[in-house]
Structures are given as C-alpha cells and as structure tokens.
Amino acid sequence: MTNHFSTQAVHAGEDKRKPYGALTNPIFQTSTYTFENTDEILDFMRKKAAKSPQLRDEYGRYSNPTQSVVERKLAVLDRGERALLFASGMCAITTTLLALLTPGDHLVMTRGCYRRTQEFALSFLSRWGVETTLVSIGEPDGLSEAIRPNTRVIFAETPTNPYLRVPDLPHMVALAKQQGIITVVDSTFATPINLRPIEYGVDLVIHSATKYLAGHNDLLAGVVIGSRELLTRIEELRGLLGGVAGPHDAYLLLRGLKTLELRVNRQNENGMRVASFLEQHPAVSRVYYPGLPSHPDHEVARRLMSGFGGVVSFEINGDLEKTGRFIDRLRLPYIGPTLGGVESIVQQQAIFISLDPRERREAGIADNLVRYALGIENAEDLIADLEQALAGI
Ligand SMILES: Cc1ncc(COP(=O)(O)O)c(C=O)c1O
C-alpha cells in the first residue's frame, strides 16, 4: 500500500519508535561519533568496505542521524532511491555537476535556469574544460541540435524564474536516453507536490530546499534525489568538498516538510487566483503563469504538473520607477529575493539584477516586471491588497 503525500510528508523516513520515546526526531548536535574500542572501529571499517547499508555514523561531514531522516523522507516524496542533503541549493547543484563532469565533457543547459547556476556553468566549469550550450525551452529542435558526442549532462529547471517556462521533460529524457546522457532537473519551483521529474525518467532532481521544502524562510539547504548509483558518486564528492547541512537546519527542514502538501496546495490556489485577477486588470500588461492558457507552456504544464505553483510574474503598465512605486504600495508581501515560504514575497527583479539599464536588458528582464511569490495568506486579502496598490499608481 502506498500512502498519499500528506501521510508520507508526516511519516516517511522516520522510525515510529524514537530515542526516549520522543515524538519528534532528536537533533544530534554533534560533529563526530566516537568508538568504544579498536574492535568497534575494525567492525565499522569492514562494513564500510562491504558498502553495508547498516553503516553507523562516523563524522559529521559524511552523515548525521537528523540529516539522514530528512534524506529518507525526501527520497520517498520525489520517488528516488536516495537523497543527499547539502548546505544550500547552490551547493547541491555545484557538487552534482562537478561529480558528473570531467574536462572535455559538454553540458547542455536550458535557458532561464537560476542565474547563479548558469554563472557556475558558463564562468566556472568553462575554466575546467567543460563547455556549456544553452538551449531555449519550447524550441523542439533546439535540444537535439545542441547535443554532441561528448555531451554528458542535460540540466534543466522547471518552472523557470521569472517567466515560469516548463520544459518538456519526456521529450528531453527520450533524447538523453538514446545517447546515454544524464538528465538533471532543478525542480525547486515545482516541488514534489506539483511535479515529480523522476516519474518522467529524469535521473536526478535537485531542489533549493531553502524555498518550498523548508517553507518558513529560516534556513538554507539543498537536496539531490535519484538512483543509489549516481548518488554514491555525488556523496563521495560531498564528503570531499564538505557542503553538508547542519543538524539543526536538518531538523527545521524536517519540521517544515510535514506541512509541505498543505502549504503548496494553498500556494497553488493563491497562484491561480492572483494570476487570473491580474490578467483581467487594465493596469497589468502581461501575466506569466503556467496555469493560464495564455502561457506559452500551458499545454506542457497541464500534461506534467498537478498544480502550477505559487509564483506569478507580471508586467505593469509603467517604467522602472512606476513599478517600484507599485511594489512600495503593497501592504502584505515582504520585499526580498527569495520565495516558497509561508509569507508572500514580492520583487522587482530588474533592480536586484543591476542598476545599469544595459545589463538589465542583457539579462532579459523588463524594468516593469514584478515577481510575486505567494505565501499561504488568504487569496482575497492578497487580491484586495493588489487592487489598492494598482489603483494608486
Ligand atoms: C531555482 C533555484 N535553484 C537553486 C537556487 C539556489 O538555492 P540556494 O539559495 O538554497 O543556494 C535558487 C535560489 O534562489 C533557485 O531559485
């Protein structure tokens, strides 16, 4: 019997009987694990050499019991064999790509990935002999034309930020499988509630757990989920580079995950209602939301996703200054650069990118673009707030 998401979010990966009969998982706030005597070390070393699944903890850079519970839960939620937790989403992305690629390899990346992910590929991996080709989402031949004999990885993000493009994962997987290429999808904006890339054949799923998975804007973490075989390669490099999440952050993430489905369902509902409201408002010139038929990837999103997420991007009738005034008039959301938590957060992306208009144009972000990451507040209150802010500009 397979449990539903809410049940898995609460129970998966956890022992029913915890130390001291505690209901919640203890935070093992320790950097290391000691041995009783030499025999115990020898026993540990034998099990390690045999790759025994019952291996005890040794040192905090390799594993921690609080972290392991979160990893087991995330593997179940995203339908992978295993999960590995990292200190941040970027740490999960960079460690994964470094583990999979060697000099002379070629990486294909879909356009619109998180700008730091693109920067890592284009400015850092290039120095280590890995070339990257960017391909546009929604151009059917773009991907097959970009693939070369030395392509080892296709990296995509879904939905992208801020235009919420949704790549056709089954198409991507079919091309990759023909040529033995590993597919990696950053599914931060989708969450396992709305989309599970592994069900479409994707090899590895990454999340910035800082966002929806943790859900309360109080920690940084990242996760990669997939097969045991691939994760063993990544785990070795994680142990070497050292980007692990601390036990306390692992606990907060575990607690946040318990309400994942409740939060994401509310954020999906808020996303749809706010996007529909904005689309009919005369002061708004364009809305980007994959749940709307006007979005270029609406058909793909409907095919792959069970909900369209809590981020709505839109352009208002106005310039950089007018858009800033609109944001300043909003009373409910915080202004800031993250998303996925219980509080709504709004951002004029152009200002965060650069004060230089030329650099903003190059980044493809319009001055009047607003990214609204909806929290779990009441949709009517959020819409009333938007209405008063739009009326005043
Ligand atoms: C889609 C996406 N992936 C990865 C990251 C990086 O995650 P973190 O900030 O946890 O390092 C972000 C962060 O903004 C993101 O939006």
Image (spheres, rainbow, N blue to C red):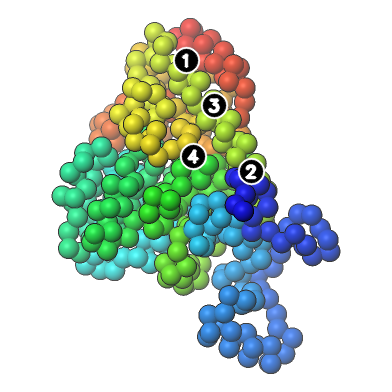
Name the residue tied to disc 1. 277
Residue 6: image tag:
2
* 86 to 166, vertically: above or below: below
Amino acid type at circle 2 is Ser
Label 2 to label 3, Cα distance in Å? 17 Å
**Contact? badges 1 and 3 (CB < 8 Å):** no
Amino acid type at circle 4 is Asn
**Contact? badges 4 and 1 (CB < 8 Å):** no
Name the N-terminal-most of marks 1 and 2.
2
**Contact? badges 2 and 4 (CB < 8 Å):** no
Residue 194: image tag:
4
Element assignment for label 2: helix
* 365 to 57, vertically: above or below: above
Element assignment for label 1: helix
Residue toward you, 372 or 108: 108
Image x and y of residue 101, in percent: 31, 65
Amino acid type at circle 3 is Glu
* 200 to 365, vertically: above or below: below
Name the N-terminal-most of marks 3 and 4.
4
Name the residue tied to disc 3. 269
